[in-house]
Amino acid sequence: MSEAINAASIEAGTPAPDFTMPTDGGGSVTLSALRGKPVVLYFYPKDDTSGCTSEACGFRDQFPDFSGLDAVVIGVSKDSVASHDKFKAKYELPFTLASDKETGVAEAYGVWVEKSMYGRKYMGLERATFLIDKDGIVRNVWRKVKVTGHVAAVLKALQAL
């Protein structure tokens, strides 16, 4: 991972920071190994919570459309691989879930942010999605994602690549 990249500068037209993360099923995923295919990289706060489940099921339900465009969908959270395995099995998710336990990838993409709930401040993952083209360039960025309509917006942007 390049430390020289300012996370705030991750926007459309910039190279996507490379990473390797452990995934569900005991595997791993490396962004640069996916060159030649578009990648939908979405960050979400926690497995098996209402908003995150809704978003994951949205990607699951539209997955044939994404794979039909040769796109790779990767969901990323701080949860463990074991948690991802359970989440993936419970909702029959057909795409990769990656574990960013140390938050290095989230930091590189600028989505490890200060949050606030009931007046308490804490660090957490911002719900965000990055559409990366087949050459490793970020083409679209959605930050502070609201789940409703989001998967359709990502699919539309992918179709426009």
Image (cartoon, rainbow, N blue to C red):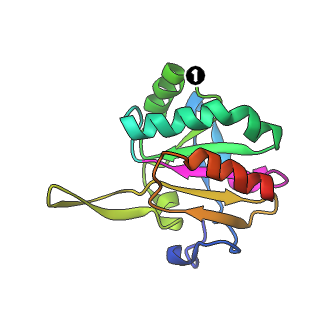
Q: Is residue 158 above or below residue 12?
A: above
Q: Is residue 127 left or right of residue 17?
A: left
In this rendered view, identify the residue nearer to me: 140 or 8: 140
Q: Measuring from the top left, give residue 145's x and y in whole percent.
A: 47, 55
Q: Is residue 43 left or right of residue 137?
A: left
In this rendered view, identify the residue nearer to me: 109 or 63: 63
Q: Is residue 113 left or right of residue 64?
A: left
Q: Is residue 158 above or below residue 53?
A: below
Question: What residue is drawn where x is 60% and y is 71%?
Answer: 2
Give the residue number, with chain letter if any, for mark 1.
92
The quadrant where residue 17 appears: bottom right
Question: What residue is drawn where x is 69% and y is 66%?
Answer: 138
Q: Is residue 124 left or right of residue 27?
A: left
Q: Which quadrant, please, contains the N terminus? A: bottom right
Question: What residue is drawn where x is 81% and y is 50%?
Answer: 37
Q: For the magenta stretch, what is the residue range?
A: 31-44
Label 1 CA crowd tier, 10 Å (few <14, some 14–19, many 20+) = few
Would residue 41 be counted in the magenta stretch?
A: yes
Question: What residue is drawn where x is 85% and y is 53%?
Answer: 36
In this rendered view, identify the residue nearer to me: 54 or 96: 54
Q: Measuring from the top left, give residue 22's x and y in whole percent.
A: 56, 42
Q: Which quadrant, please, contains the C terminus? A: bottom right
Tell me the SS state at disc 1.
loop
Residue type beneath disc 1:
Glu
Does the rendering let one see residue 128?
yes
Q: Is residue 133 above or below residue 88?
A: below
The quadrant where residue 4 appears: bottom right
